[in-house]
Image (spheres, helix red, strand yellow):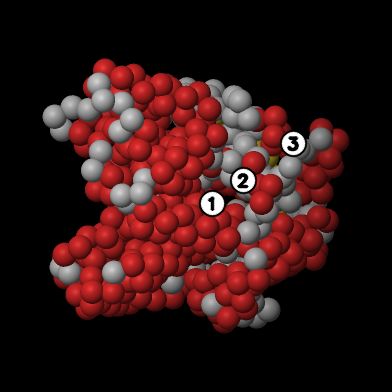
Amino acid sequence: MTRHPLLGASAFLVALTVILTWPQALYLGSRVAAHSDPLLSIWRLSWIAHVLPGHPQQLIDGNIFTPHVRTLAYSDATLLQGLLAAPWLWARMNPVFIYNVLLLSGIVLSGVGMFVLAQHLTGNADAALVAAAIFTLLPYRILHFMHLELQWTMWMPLALWAVHRVFETGSIRYGVATGALLVLQAISSLYYGAFLGIIVAVLTILLAIADPRQFKRAFVPLCLGAAIAFAAGAAYTMPYVANTAVLGVRDQAEVTKFSATLASYITAPQENWLWGWTAFRFEGDELRLFPGIAAIALAILAAGLTRRRAIVVTYLVVMAVAAAFSLGFNNPVYRLLYAHVWPMQGFRAPARFGILTGCALAVLAGFGFDYLAQRFSRSRLRNGLLIAVLVAIGVECGSAPMRLDELPRQTPDVYRFLRILDQAVVIELPIAESDLAPVYMYWSTQHWHRLVNGYSGFSPPDYAETLTRLRTFPDDRSIERLQRLNVRYIVVHEMFYKPKEHAALLLRLGRREDIAPAGRYRDWAGVAQVFELKRKSGEGCHSDTSRLSRETRRPPCS
């Protein structure tokens, strides 16, 4: 390693991330992972930047699923990433570029955080680099390459490091740091904030059992950190708790579907160079958690460290607990938590606990490498060993090239037209195709009208009724539904209809006296036509929301 191990490790991890996600680094401003969720994330970042300067009180009320409120909290709000992105978006930088930089930064900084933890525990910078490489290159990251919030795991190893420092020093400063790091994880990813809180509690108990005297001096700082995390977490989750009354909790069948099994840990993502063939043999989406043979072998070697047996056993238990929680409903303890602890009822995929399994495994692998390196007395041999291990990890975890989608650089004319109109409620058709909703949301960042359309972790219950009513659009019942929703502008995208179907739709629209054409414009795929839905006579605005609950109403005119 260099004279400045952290700087050298950081540079190495940047290069490693570029290779892991190749060719993403070539297209930071124009391409994203081939999935709908990057568009959702860009919308979230853009919404936070849009609303903060003038209307911060509306932060949680995204412009989707109109007329419902708190729609930013229908999925992870990614508040921290949004706050970091805001100044750059205010400077009118490319939001796709900002999104990709945040995505890759999350991967790099996760490795840096692991380096800090592993170096502190092993006292060996080379071992720390191995641990950091494993945590950076976990195949799990490729499984979730489209999820911005799930790459922001740097707070996990740093929180564990802070807990160790509290036990070692009894310092209030490190107790506060532990609480702050838990909060940072929660506002980066609510999933991971809750999961990390459980693992921090487990680590604290294990360290207290190992050394009760250290626990006595760590008790007050840890309580202070816990109070900080609890208070901030309670405040941050208030919109999510309120949404439970409208959206309900995750269905048990859905949670079961995304609960890992033991076979998940021998199943890799299909993109993996060496082990992709396992993806089709064992498990499905979200459940491919194989960390690699190199990481497992190094962790097994850690058992030979008699000098550090206590800390190795501690992380073996932490890893086992994380793996057990990833089993979700295949683990009776998780079922008990689901029944009685609110945050767990909102999480769809317990398998995501696998990232903390990987975190603990990386620490153990660092100890294993340290044990192996001690068998070599000459520095040249140790350097050769380090290179060989890093190459083995890189090859085993390699998945490039990533599948990327190109995003249009220019704003389509139809959204330029909407931008110049007074604020209103807009619906884009077709609406039933779920893969179009995130595209509509992405382009809504160019005009910020309120959308009936939406895509998120949850959908409001009456959204299904809207979809049903619009199957027969534009008959009287569907128009009545749109009027209840205060819709003023209807955008019809020609490309996503069959030619005869589109022609028949235009013919029916032309026969209605309450719908007026407002122009034909280019969209991102072809041509779109805009229609204005006229207000009912005697109404100042589309305000008939009598069938919608008070909970979901917004001001009908703005």
- Position above or below: 322 against 108: below
Q: Is residue 81 left or right of residue 140?
A: left
- Residue sitting at 82 percent across and 59 percent down? 475
- Mark sitting on residue 280: 3
Quadrant where the image shows the N terminus: top left
Who is closer to the viewer here, 514 or 328?
328
Residue type at mark 2 is Tyr
Measure how far apart labels 3 and 2 are at the Cα level. Answer: 14 Å
How many residues crowd around disc 2 within 10 Å: few (fewer than 14), some, or many (20 or more)?
some
Measure how far apart labels 1 and 2 are at the Cα level. Answer: 9 Å
Q: Secondary structure at mark 3?
A: helix
Quarter location, residue 336: bottom right
Who is closer to the viewer here, 333 or 346?
333
- Position above or below: 336 against 89: below
Q: Is residue 1 left or right of residue 392?
A: left
**Which residue is labeled 1 in the image?**
354
Earlier-in-chain disc, 1 versus 3: 3
